[in-house]
Amino acid sequence: MMVPSQLSLVPSFVLMATFGWVGSFKALIIPGMVNAFGIFWIRQYATESIPNDLLDAGRIDGCNIFRLYWNVALPILRPAFAFLGAFTFIGVWNDYLWPLIVLTDARKYTLQIALSQLNGLYNTDYAMVIAGTLLAVIPLIVMFLFISRQFISDIAAGAVKD
């Protein structure tokens, strides 16, 4: 996390070329699903927010490890997963450099690459750029509307003290 992501571009590209994924959307989707920050975030959140007493109570009640995870830990980790999903989606959605390197066919370019190509050398159609930017922002707004309910309900649940 302290190393700039640009340093991993060449090894990641070599890996994608080895898998035969250069020029396909697999090279964008699969590496974008998991990152070091997500692993660190979930681990930190889990160690701080899941009380050992709650896990012990589940074990006493006869829960196996899968049921402990599914019925005890996962509901507590839901806000962390919501944040991580939003954070990852925004990062992948706004990524410009990696799709520019990996995608070789202009028909598969992402919206961000297409928006950058709307700027002409001597002339820019600003109406087209603004319309494209509006299209680029709509998925982020929709994602926020769906995830904001999760955050608001968790804030309200944490505000009440038992």
Image (tube, rainbow, N blue to C red):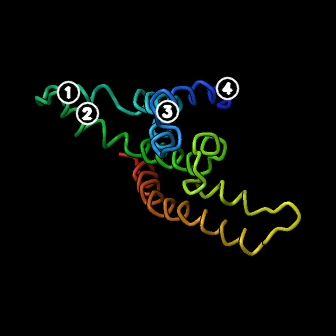
- Asked which secondary structure carries label 3, the reply is helix
Nearest the viewer among 77 and 159 is: 77
- Asked which secondary structure carries label 4, the reply is helix
Q: Earlier in the sequence, mark 2 or mark 4?
A: 4
Q: Residues within 10 Å of mark 1 (few under 14, many from 20)?
A: few
Q: Earlier in the sequence, mark 3 or mark 2?
A: 3
The three-letter code of the residue at mark 3 reads Trp
Q: Earlier in the sequence, mark 4 or mark 3?
A: 4
The disc at residue 7 is: 4
The three-letter code of the residue at mark 4 reads Leu
The three-letter code of the residue at mark 2 reads Tyr
Residue at the limit of the structure toward the right, as seen here:
122
Going 45% across and 57% down the picture, which residue do you hit? 147
Q: Position of residue 156 (x, y in %)?
A: 43, 55
Q: Earlier in the sequence, mark 1 or mark 4?
A: 4
Front disc: 1 or 4: 4
Q: Which residue is mark 1?
A: 65
Q: Earlier in the sequence, mark 3 or mark 1?
A: 3
Q: Which residue is mark 3?
A: 41
Q: Position of residue 37 (x, y in %)?
A: 53, 32
Q: Which residue is mark 2?
A: 69
- Asked which secondary structure carries label 2, the reply is helix
